Amino acid sequence: MEDTTRTILMVDDEENILSSLQRLLRRENYNVITNASPEKALEILKHEPVSLIISDQRMPEMDGTEFLEKARQIQPEAIRIILTGYADISAAMAAINQGQVYRFITKPWNDLDLKANIKQAIDFYHLRKENQRLFELTVQQNTELKELNENLERKVEERTQEIARLYKELQSSYFKTIRIFMDLMQMYDPALGGHAKRVAVLSRLLAEKCELQGEELDVVEAAGSLHDIGLIGIPREIIRKKGSGRTAAEEALYRQHPALGYAILNSVPKLDQVSILVKSHHEWFDGAGYPDRLKKEEIPLGARIIAVADVYDHLSVRRDISREDVLHRLHKLAGAELDPSVVSAAIEVFSAIKTADRAEVAVTLADLRPDMVLARELKTHTGRLLMPKDAVLKEAYLEKIKRFHEIDPIVGWIYVYR
């Protein structure tokens, strides 16, 4: 039986082009279907699942843009590539902007480039299918969690068991596990995912300042990335409320997230040390924190570092507080909620960041808002320039950026002026 997840449909009215494409891919592990008629190709799509469709732009029955739009209606998940001559590039770009195609390739093509583009398209198809699978698992989990409203301990226990069961397959790879857990946070709540990424960076900077080295640095950074993993499944409206705005039951549920995060991560190989820091990141230096009311040096140093980074990020993303006020508030929390020595290190490190970055702030795609100004060029993973430095983001631009991100991801931080 053919592997439909590696099936390619090629459509071109010129048989010699189809023959050339077949020869190019004959040693690759693809199931290649060819047809010279767009109408017949559409009939094939009605009963033959494919992962990639490659179409010529100029064909007598209908042009490639029209064909791919009709193909999208039949198999919306299939990746679409258009072959075009230089004279048709504007039409191909229009198709990309309308969300019809993954990318265009000019004729005559370079064999190595074409094979690389086909491999990237197939890989992107698999990545998107995997993301959809994980999203559906998360939706299923959230639906089940919303139905639990009577027994708080039972809700936490069932959520822990369900997450541990669903993601048991992730235990084989340390970094892959961390990356996928972060993707889950991003899918559940983009703001939560963005916060986790920033806390990871800040925690590593502070850990270096506190003279941690080697594996200790990696553990702190990983724990910074996953410190709020236990919030997955807790209703977003509860997460976004301030502590004083929650009911007693809501606050009790919210305060379970460090212990829940510990339970999730402690069951994964190589994340036992990370899980300890995650469990303790809400312990207070004076002993008034949770879940175990540890104090001073009873709290692991990595957890004390993450606590400072966590508070700093929550304050620094607020537009009504200046950088100086953020540092002042950290200083006021020293000795009570936060470790004074870590706060001193943070003030030194974060003050230096301000001087070096000259009011730049690193954000994620989910953090972008209208009227933000780009501090650096905004490019996709393949180097495509989406917006120049100093561009002002408008609502329409944000929608276009998100569409391009789906077919050619934006990797890493996006820098805007504070």
Image (cartoon, rainbow, N blue to C red):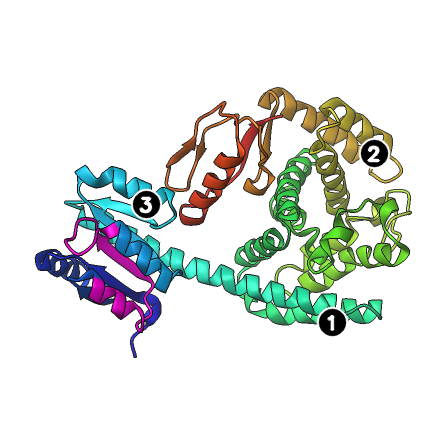
Would you name the residue on which mark 3 appears? 95
Q: CA distance from mark 3 to mark 2?
A: 57 Å
Tell me where the magenta segment starts and ends, as one range.
39-64
Q: Nearer the viewer, residue 42 or 134?
A: 42
Quarter in which the N terminus is drawn:
bottom left
Do callouts 3 and 2 mark residues in contact (Cβ within 8 Å)?
no
Q: Earlier in the sequence, mark 3 or mark 1?
A: 3
The front one of 253 and 259 is: 253
Q: Which residue is mark 1?
A: 158
Q: Is residue 387 visible?
A: yes
Residue 302: quadrant of the picture: top right
Mark 2 residue type = Pro
- Nearer mark to the viewer, of 1 and 2: 1
Quadrant showing the C terminus = top right
Point out the frontmost of discs 3 and 2.
Answer: 3
Left or right: where does residue 309 sit relative to residue 122? Answer: right
Where residue 281 sits: x, y (%)? Answer: 77, 48
